[in-house]
Amino acid sequence: MSRRSRVGWLVAVLATGTVAADVLHLKDGRSIPVESWEFKGDSIVFEIPAGSVTIPRSLLERVEVTTPLATKVATPSENSPAPPSGKSPAASRPAPPSAPKTSTIPEKPPADWSRLSEDAKERELEKMKRALRDNPRQREEISRQLALGLSDLAARWANQGDLAAAQTRFGEALSYDPHCLPAVIGLSSVYLKQGKDSYARAQIEEGLVFFPKDPTLHYLLGEVHYVQENLRDAISEWETSLSLKSDPRVTARLEKARREFAVDEGYQRKDTAHFTFRYEESGSIPESLAASLRSYLEDEYGELCDRFQFVPPGPLVVILYPSRDFHQVTQEPATVAGLFDGKIRIPLGGVKTLNPPLRAVLVHELTHAFVFGKSGGNCPRWLQEGLAQLQEGKSPSPAEERSLVRDLAASEGRSWYDEFSYASSLSFTRYLSERYPFQIFLEALDRMKTGGSAEEALQESTREDFAQLQKSWLDQLVRQFAEGH
């Protein structure tokens, strides 16, 4: 950039909004209001809100004096440009005294944002936004404080389950300070929870440029690799994270990934429109069965999209195991017929065809994926299992319901869903589905996604007290038992 171009840039960017002061008029017709100025050899040095600036004296046409010369840093030499025509420096009229400047910067920013209520945080943030407008010379510090405050507020939304609100706040924080680590971590985590792993990866990798030794960013990048079925890189990132900071959560994830990698490293991968399938290329799972599974799950995917009015944000991973491999990886008992832990895991054992029991397991686990996504991961286990069993077409037997009535009668006031059972989950969920349209579940899942509890969400959807819903269900069970049904 040429010397004249630099001066032009300073005039355009920094002179706007300056308080009344002397004005340097340049030979090209532009003017710069300054707080103070002095000549130093062939240069003129002046102060503006952005700091000290030096330009060649040859560019100066004249100085318009608007404050007493006695207040100048240095008096111009005899070669200085003359003051405005008809006035001498001594005769220049002093500017009227200005009121002392007041700053809108909070005198003491909150040391611990977590102790403030949400309303108090919002008020503090508004104060800092005003301070940012009124104090441009302190932009960096105020922006940093703003980003930290917004990140804390966003974290509260994320903890409450309102991921959309959290994403907005974390994004706003990064608009003030792109290198705010809590915001980088928070936004990356929210993206992962929303199933936006590509967005999460881009955000994390950008963060690692500035924070290459942050253990949480390496942990999150490992999660991205894990979701994308890149176990080797997931293991590497989690090992890096643990080398920087010990964390039991990361240790557990690493151990599980190592078990999976030892089992399915050689599994082939088949991608369809909505799924990523992994299974042994030559082994206990015939290709004809795998092909039938892929076709069946694609059909059910469309049915569940319509049923739950929800489309998962990315491909769902389905891993088909020989029974021994399934139990080695998941460490679940042999009685478990399927699992959804972010991925759909199915032990096929000696199954050779797509029979009705296998269809039921596939629909059950696929329903878990939809309910998880629809609720933002906030649906409790009792409702998750109730909806999954309902979707596969399961009904509790009379013996199960008689046993359930006895258990509930002996619960001594304990909530039935505190001690989970598949029978109670299915029975209560089926009761709700028979009494209300399925839409109440969709509305409830949407409310859970924004932080509401299942109880609150169902109460709002049904317009009936949740305790009363449970009582009505129990009364119906007791009547059926008493009537011998």
Image (spheres, grey):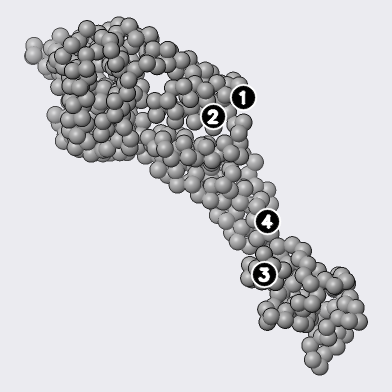
Where's residue 288, x and y in %?
18, 18
Q: Quadrant of residue 355?
A: top left
Decide: is 18 above or below 398. below
**Quadrant for the N terminus in the image:** bottom right
Tags 2 and 3 touching, CB below 8 Å: no
Disc 4 versus disc 3: distance between alpha carbons?
26 Å
Residue 415 shows up from this direction: no
308 relative position to 269: left or right: left
Where's residue 272, x and y in %?
26, 30
Amino acid type at mark 2 = His
The residue lying toward the viewer, choosing from 170 and 264, is 264
Disc 4 versus disc 1: distance between alpha carbons?
34 Å
Where's residue 150, x and y in %?
53, 46
- Which residue in the protein does label 3 denote? 5
Disc 4 versus disc 2: distance between alpha carbons?
33 Å
Amino acid type at mark 1 = Leu
Disc 1 versus disc 2: distance between alpha carbons?
9 Å
Amino acid type at mark 4 = Gln
Q: Residue at x 20, y 30 (%)?
A: 298
Residue 218 - label: 2
Disc 2 versus disc 3: distance between alpha carbons?
44 Å
